[in-house]
Amino acid sequence: METKEEKVEQGVTRIRPGDGRSLRVLGEVVTYKITSELTGGAYSLFEVVSEPGGEPPPHVQHREDEAFYVLEGEYEFLDDDGHTMRAGTGSLVYVPKGSLHTYKNVGTTPGKMLVSQTPGGLHERFFEEIGQEAQDKSKLTLSRGQVNDERIVAIAATYGIEIPPPPASR
């Protein structure tokens, strides 16, 4: 990480397999592969591992576009219109800012995706506020907790992420 006295130089960067800070966030393991700090704010890229049945709450990002590239497993994505689409290994799903969306690992094994946000930075800080360090990435023991609790909804809002109440609460 950069200190106030150091300047991060932007240039060719290599991230080795297994490298990157990992956090447990909303029941998933999120590993920072490239941060906005290294891309001049252009984008952030994360590796996300989710357990079978794992899903973040439906949400809207008002400041970033998001892309999901499925590396392993089978996911189901929900879009703005309430439609679902399946996305297996090798699939890419693009979500423009302002679109309600979520995804769910519908496979029987942990799934893995690369997830990017453009521009970068906001999700990095959001994950840091609500996540916990993942000391051992090889052990996928995920706990979901309350993803719609008021604290997380309030923190998300400060980063331009809207988490609407579940339909039963409306």
Image: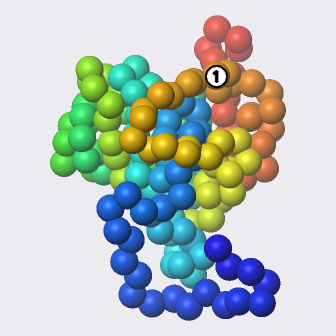
Residue situated in front as seen by the camera: 19 or 39: 19
The residue that label 1 is drawn on is 145
In the visual, does 12 lie left or right of 91?
right
Figure colour scheme = rainbow
Residue 154 picture location, percent across and down:
80, 38
Q: In this view, does 141 lie above or below 6?
A: above
Residue situated in front as seen by the camera: 131 or 120: 131
Q: Split into 4 quadrants, where in the image is the C terminus?
A: top right
Residue 160 picture location, percent across and down:
70, 51
Q: In percent of the image, x 51 and y 88: which residue is there?
A: 10
Residue 41 picture location, percent across and down:
58, 75
Assess disc 1: are there few (<14), some (14-19) or many (≥20) residues with their C-alpha within 10 Å of its C-alpha: few
Q: Split into 4 quadrants, where in the image is the N terminus?
A: bottom right
Residue 91 picture location, percent across and down:
22, 46
Q: In this view, does 36 lie above or below 90?
A: below
In this view of the protein, can residue 103 be seen by the observer?
no
Element marked by disc 1: loop
In the visual, does 74 lie left or right of 153?
left
Q: Based on the displayed image, in which of its 4 quarters is residue 9 positioned?
A: bottom right
